[in-house]
Image (tube, grey):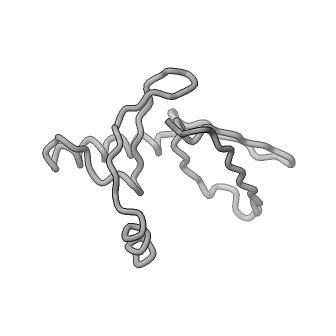
Amino acid sequence: MQALAGARAKYPPVEHPVVRVHPVTGKKILYVNPTFTSHIKGLPRAQSDALLTQLYALITVPEYQARLRWQPNTLAVWDNRSTQHYAVGDYFPQHRKLHRITFTADQAF
């Protein structure tokens, strides 16, 4: 919690639209996540909390997830602008080694 407070002091909260347009596909996407989205501006707090709770619950529904069966040399690539990452620790007792690479663009949106 202390690290989060320090990060918020260094990078104050900002406003983003809940619905954005993907710069490549032109499709509408939801732009919320439980770590950084505190509320939906313009909605009463109770209504905002209820809607965000419902959206966040969808992240955990297997029917809405892309799941991989990890094998040696598996490579997974996703677009963080339109994908909600939900890591499932279902590989015990095996070990997973990850290398994260971030591609940059002129701008995210």
Q: Nearer the viewer, residue 45 or 8?
A: 8
Q: Position of residue 67 (x, y in %)?
A: 64, 40
Q: Position of residue 87 (x, y in %)?
A: 58, 53
| Residue drawn at point x = 82 percent, y = 46 percent | 71
Q: Position of residue 53 (x, y in %)?
A: 31, 47
| Residue located farthest toward the top when viewing the structure as drawn | 26
| Residue drawn at point x = 13 percent, y = 45 percent | 44
- In the image: residue 7, left or right of residue 104: left
Give the total number of marks visible in the rendering. Answer: 0
| Residue located farthest toward the front when viewing the structure as drawn | 106
Q: Nearer the viewer, residue 32 or 25?
A: 25
| Residue located farthest toward the left when viewing the structure as drawn | 44
| Residue drawn at point x = 41 percent, y = 39 percent | 31
| Residue drawn at point x = 49 percent, y = 35 percent | 109
Q: Nearer the viewer, residue 109 or 54?
A: 109
- In the image: residue 74, left or right of residue 87: right
Quadrant where the image shows the N terminus:
bottom left
- In the image: residue 35, left or right of residue 104: left
| Residue located farthest toward the bottom when viewing the structure as drawn | 2
Q: Position of residue 73 (x, y in %)?
A: 86, 47
- In the image: residue 69, left or right of residue 38: right
